[in-house]
Image (cartoon, grey):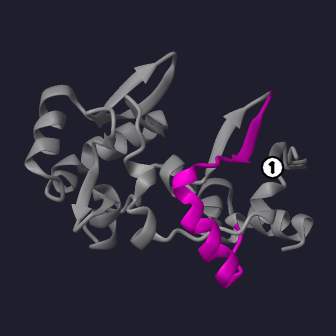
Amino acid sequence: MQPDFIEIDNILVSTDISETPFTCDLAKCKGACCTMESKYGAPLKKEEIEIINKNLPIIKEYLSKEHQKEIEKNGFWMQIHGEYMTKSIDNRACVFVSWENDIAKCSIEKAYSDGKIDFIKPASCHLFPIRVGQFGGKVLRYEKYIECEPALKLGEKIKTNILNFCKDALQREFGKEWFTKIKDIMRV
């Protein structure tokens, strides 16, 4: 069944964002969203490249020597067909992945959590599993991955949907007023 879309301030939002239970379960998925097979990493905004570059010396402190060397040799981002994205290592891990035991985590977010930088991570990562596309304007949709099955189960168990799971990211990206409107319209 295809999801419906609701328009909120010229942004189309898929209803499955409010209907799908979701809460990341890192103990089970192991940070799969940061290590999905692809020669491309996470989508970036041009202004995020500048912010990351400014904070790169601190962020690199959280990375393995292999990831540090990759960034020093080839940089951390690329542009394909006018789109910016992080690079990946071995067509797998985002160049910013650092490992805690067997769980992939974001070195940018770790530096932020430690109070060393004021940028949490790229918006595309913060919004995940929501993806922002363009179709005559912004379109928000749920991007399904088999690796996120544990998140669906945990979200169902604790009664949290994608919309509420991504609250901070949505408010960061579209504002608190917009988020209040979407919650009211979607009745969640």
Q: Is residue 74 left or right of residue 88?
A: left
Q: Residue 158 appears in which quarter of the rendering?
A: bottom right
The spot of residue 179 in percent (x, y) is 75, 64
The spot of residue 185 in percent (x, y) is 91, 64
The spot of residue 111 in percent (x, y) is 27, 64
Q: Amino acid at mark 1?
A: Val
Nearer to the camera, 37 or 10? 37
Nearer to the camera, 1 or 69? 1
Q: How many marks?
A: 1
Residue at horizontal 74 percent and vertical 38 percent from the top: 138
Q: Classify 87 as above or below 147.
A: above
Label 1: how many Cα within 10 Å (few below 14, some 14–19, many 20+): many
Looking at the rendered image, the quarter that the C terminus falls into is bottom right
Q: Residue furthest bottom?
A: 158
Magenta span covers which residues? 136-161
Residue at horizontal 36 percent and vertical 25 percent from the top: 78
Q: Is residue 57 left or right of residue 44?
A: left
Residue 13 in magenta stretch: no
Q: Residue 98 appears in which quarter of the rendering?
A: bottom left
Q: Is residue 153 left or right of residue 89?
A: right
Residue 140 in magenta stretch: yes
Residue at horizontal 49 percent and vertical 71 percent from the top: 25
Which residue is labeled 1 in the image? Answer: 13
**Local secondary structure at mark 1:** strand
Residue at horizontal 22 percent and vertical 68 percent from the top: 101
